[in-house]
Image: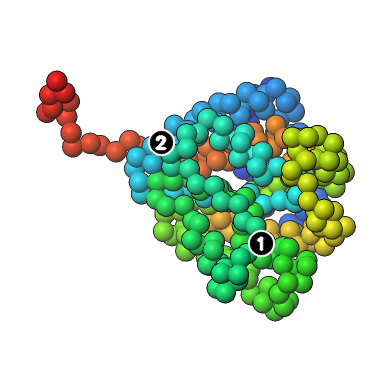
Amino acid sequence: MSTPSIAATRQALIAAPGKTFDLSSRDTGDKSLFEDKENAETSLKKDAATINELKDMMYAEGKRSLLVILQGMDTSGKSGTIKGVFSDTTPLGMEVKAFKAPSSNELARDYLWRIHNAVPKKGNIGIFDRSHYEDVLVVKVRGFAPAEEIEQRYAQINAFEKHLTENGVTIVKCMLNVGYEEQGVRLAERLEEPHKLWKFNPGDLEDRKLWPQYMDAYQTAVTRCSTRHAPWYVIPSDSRTRRNAMIARLVRGALEDMKLEWPVSEYKPGDFDIG
């Protein structure tokens, strides 16, 4: 089976801006893009190598940046995605930020302050493990802010992302859509496997009890904040390999769309005597 084109991958995964979106209609175990897991692994390896090459070109150019936003329920595979998609990527020009509960210093400022401070500088790829969307997801579900404030945030987030894209930042937003049953399996794995035990947090079980509320919050966030300048892609994430392969297709596509070229140097080989 051939690898799906980048265009086909985008079309299959996008939450089309301005269109009705129903999260429950998205199969968390969908295999339509990569029916064969071996094909997914092959595609991932090729894309990971190409992403590294394109990242080096963007770093050398130093004019634009790429921001990859990974948002999803616990165990959806945000850190696993980073490890898989960027497995061939050298650290130079890479920035990874995991957003946890805000500090007292961050709470003393507006909720986007800490996000803007973490936006990758020109030439770099930045990866957000969770993001500003926590402020319309967990904050909404847990009631940490008044409903009227949360309602304002959708438009504020859209304006913020538009500002970034107008200033040289390409944004790829991926919702890692894991199923309820698969999450249960993965939470059990964290308790049973020694190398995963450190990941277990009893608080994850409290969020699991609120699964319907979180799904409603995700549907609203994706619907309200999938825009032409920064659309949302909903990634079926019950299969780790297929998840990584699909996101690698999207990241590669975003870099290829930049039409990157190696910068022309003023130096010529004959102008210097290396000795």
Name the residue rendered at 36%, 49% in the picture: 63
Q: Amino acid at mark 1?
A: Ala
Decide: is 190 above or below 103.
Answer: above
Q: Percent x, y for residue 199?
A: 74, 44
Q: Quadrant of the C terminus?
A: top left
Q: Percent x, y for residue 230?
A: 56, 55
Residue 83 in sight from this viewpoint: yes
**Circles 2 and 1 in contact, beta carbons < 8 Å:** no
The residue under label 1 is: 101
97 relative position to 121: left or right: right
Q: Percent x, y for residue 30?
A: 77, 38
Residue 226 in sight from this viewpoint: no
Between 197 and 34, the one nearer to me in the picture: 197
Q: Amino acid at mark 2?
A: Asp
Tell me which label, 2 or 1, sits earlier in the chain.
2
Give me the C-alpha separation between circle 2 and circle 1.
Answer: 33 Å
Q: Percent x, y for residue 123?
A: 40, 46
- Residue 56: mark: 2
Name the residue rendered at 38%, 37% in the picture: 57
Is disc 1 surrounded by few (<14), some (14 to 19) or many (20+) residues within 10 Å?
A: few
Q: Quadrant of residue 213?
A: bottom right
104 relative position to 162: left or right: right
Q: Secondary structure at mark 1?
A: loop
Q: Secondary structure at mark 2?
A: helix
Q: Quadrant of residue 35?
A: top right
Decide: is 111 above or below 218.
Answer: below
Name the residue rendered at 78%, 66% in the picture: 141
Decide: is 42 above or below 154.
Answer: above
Q: Quadrant of the N terminus?
A: top right
